[in-house]
């Protein structure tokens, strides 16, 4: 199973869409920037068929330091979350 990094993705999109790598890289960067900007405001981004990017609140909890076995407090935080859409789920099955 091969991993695909950003450069591989840019190359694949450029060849499939018959666009320059520079244009694809700029479009991909703009997409990532807009998704990041939108979810950092607390809104969500839905790409129909692919999935939804949103923010999820994680409650404070008690954890254990694996090295010392000492109990530690993990603070509440806000984290990004991706939920796969129906088409993506079916494609992976």
Image: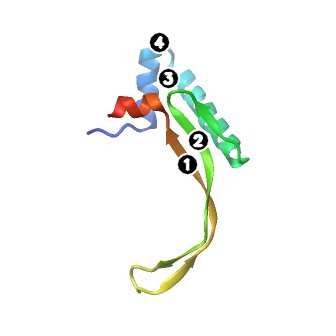
Q: Residues within 10 Å of mark 2 (few under 14, many from 20)?
A: some
Q: Which residue is mark 4?
A: 18
Left or right of 41 on screen, residue 65: left
Q: Which residue is mark 3?
A: 21
What is the distance, in whole Å, between disc 4 and disc 3 at their CAs? 9 Å
Residue 63 image position (x, y, % from top left) = 49, 77
Q: Dividing the picture into quarters, in which one does residue 57 lie?
A: bottom right
Q: Dividing the picture into quarters, in which one does residue 79 lie?
A: bottom right
Marks 2 and 1 in Cβ contact (< 8 Å):
yes
Q: Circle 3 sits in a helix, a strand or a loop, which is it? A: helix
**Residue nearest the observer in this picture, 33 or 88:** 88
What is the distance, in whole Å, between disc 4 and disc 2 at their CAs? 28 Å
Marks 3 and 2 in Cβ contact (< 8 Å):
no
For the residues carrying marks 4 and 3, which lies nearer the camera in this image? 4
- The tag earlier along the polypeptide, 2 or 1, is 2
Residue 41 image position (x, y, % from top left) = 73, 47
Location of the C terminus by quadrant is top left
Residue 83 image position (x, y, % from top left) = 51, 42
What is the distance, in whole Å, between disc 3 and disc 1 at their CAs? 29 Å
Q: Which residue is mark 1?
A: 81
What is the distance, in whole Å, between disc 4 and disc 1 at their CAs? 32 Å
Looking at the image, residue 50 lies above or below residue 71: above
Q: Dividing the picture into quarters, in which one does residue 47 lie?
A: top right
Q: Residues within 10 Å of mark 1 (few under 14, many from 20)?
A: some
- The tag earlier along the polypeptide, 3 or 2, is 3
Q: Which residue is mark 2?
A: 53
Q: Circle 1 sits in a helix, a strand or a loop, which is it? A: strand
């Amino acid at each position: 199973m091969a991993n695909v990094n950003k450069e591989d993705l840019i190359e694949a999109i450029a060849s499939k869409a018959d666009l320059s790598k520079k244009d694809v890289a700029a479009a991909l960067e703009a997409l990532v920037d807009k998704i990041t900007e939108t979810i950092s405001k607390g809104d969500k981004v839905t790409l129909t068929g692919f999935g939804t990017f949103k923010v999820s609140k994680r409650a404070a909890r008690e954890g254990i330091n694996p090295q010392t076995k000492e109990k530690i407090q993990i603070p509440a935080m806000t984290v990004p979350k991706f939920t796969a859409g129906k088409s993506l789920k079916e494609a992976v099955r």
